[in-house]
Each structure stands twice: as structure tokens, then as C-alpha cells.
Image (spheres, rainbow, N blue to C red):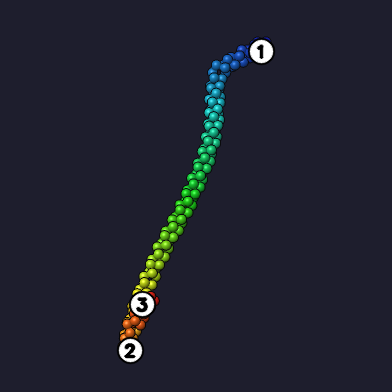
Amino acid sequence: MNINATLFAQLIVFLGLVVFTIKFVWPPIAKALDERASKIAEGLAAAERGKSDFEQAEKKVAELLAEGRNQVAEMVANAEKRAAKIVEEAKEQASVEAARISAQAKADVEQEMNRARESLREQVAALAVKGAESILRVEVDAQKHAQLLSTLKQEL
């Protein structure tokens, strides 16, 4: 055999193999590689979207936490204001009640004083009548009696 014919036959077989590979083997491999590349690209895009969504979720959670803290602070401030208002109202009511009790006590004291005065007047009048009775029993002098009665009247 001739080396040229063998080389030429090997060249034809090699070229046939290359054509066969390019026509039948390479397209499915290229297709599989393209599909794999697109899946990887989709996965990377999904990961990027997930990362972006995660960052947005973190921001939203931070905003919600800040809003919640603000609402809690506002509620606490409102509760403190309400408590101060309730305390102030209680003080006012206690003040009004104390004034009412004081006025009632003064009125009661005034009534008792008036009763005591009336009782004293009655006792003084009774004593005056007794005194007049005893004076009249001892002697009857109209001028002295009138003077005594006017003195008693002024004292009362």
C-alpha cells in the first residue's frame, strides 16, 4: 500500500467524520450548551431578583418597624397625656369637693353658733325675768326698773 493512498483515505475519513460531527453531533451538543447557558442566566437573574426583593423586603421591614416604633411612642405619649389629664381632673374634683365640704362645715358651724346664741339669749332672758321678778318682790321703783331693763336690753 501506498502511504499517499492511506493518507488520502484517512483524510477523507477524517473529513467525513468532521462533516458528520458538525451535521449530526454538534447541533444537539450546542443546543444543550445553549439551554444550559440560558438556565444559568435565568438562575442568575432569579438570584439577582431575589437579592433585590430581599433588600426591598428588608427596607420595608425597617420602615414598618420604624412606623411601629413611632406609633408605640405616640400611643405612650397619648397615654401619658391622658393620665396627666385624669390626674388634673381628679385634683379639680378633689378641690371642688374640699370647697363644698368646707362650705358645708362653715354653714354647720354657723348654724351651731346661731343655736348657741339663741340658747344663750333664752337663758339670759330667763335670768333677766328671774332678776326682774326678784327685784319686783323686794321693791317696786319704776325708774330704777326702767334703767335696769334698758341696761339689760343693751347687753343683750
Looking at the picture, which amino acid does disc 1 mark?
A: Leu
**Quarter of the C terminus within the rendering:** bottom left
Left or right, 2 with reference to 25: right
Q: Quadrant of residue 33?
A: top right
User: Closer to the N terminus: mark 2 or mark 3?
Assistant: 2
**Quarter of the N terminus within the rendering:** top right
Q: Given this view, does label 2 or label 1 mark the residue nearer the observer?
A: 2
- Mark carried by residue 138: 2
Mark 3 and mark 1: span between their CA atoms?
A: 174 Å
Residue 108: where, in percent of width, then height? 38, 69
Left or right, 52 with reference to 95: right
Looking at the picture, which amino acid does disc 2 mark?
A: Val
Mark 2 and mark 1: span between their CA atoms?
A: 186 Å
Where is mark 3, residue-wise?
Answer: 150
Q: What count of labels does the image hold?
A: 3
Residue 101 vs 62, above or below: the answer is below
Secondary structure under tag 1 reads helix
**Residue 51 or 13: which is nearer the viewer?**
51
Q: Tell me which residue sits at (55%, 16%) in the image.
A: 23
Residue 139 vs 80, above or below: the answer is below
Secondary structure under tag 3 reads helix
Left or right, 155 with reference to 14: left
Where is mark 1, residue-wise?
Answer: 7
Residue 155: where, in percent of width, then height? 39, 76
Mark 2 and mark 3: span between their CA atoms?
A: 19 Å
**Residue 6 or 53: which is nearer the viewer?**
53
Q: Residues within 10 Å of mark 2 (few under 14, many from 20)?
A: few
Looking at the picture, which amino acid does disc 3 mark?
A: Ser
Residue 28: where, in percent of width, then height? 53, 21
User: Closer to the N terminus: mark 2 or mark 1?
Assistant: 1
Secondary structure under tag 2 reads helix
Q: Tell me which residue sits at (52%, 42%) in the image.
A: 66
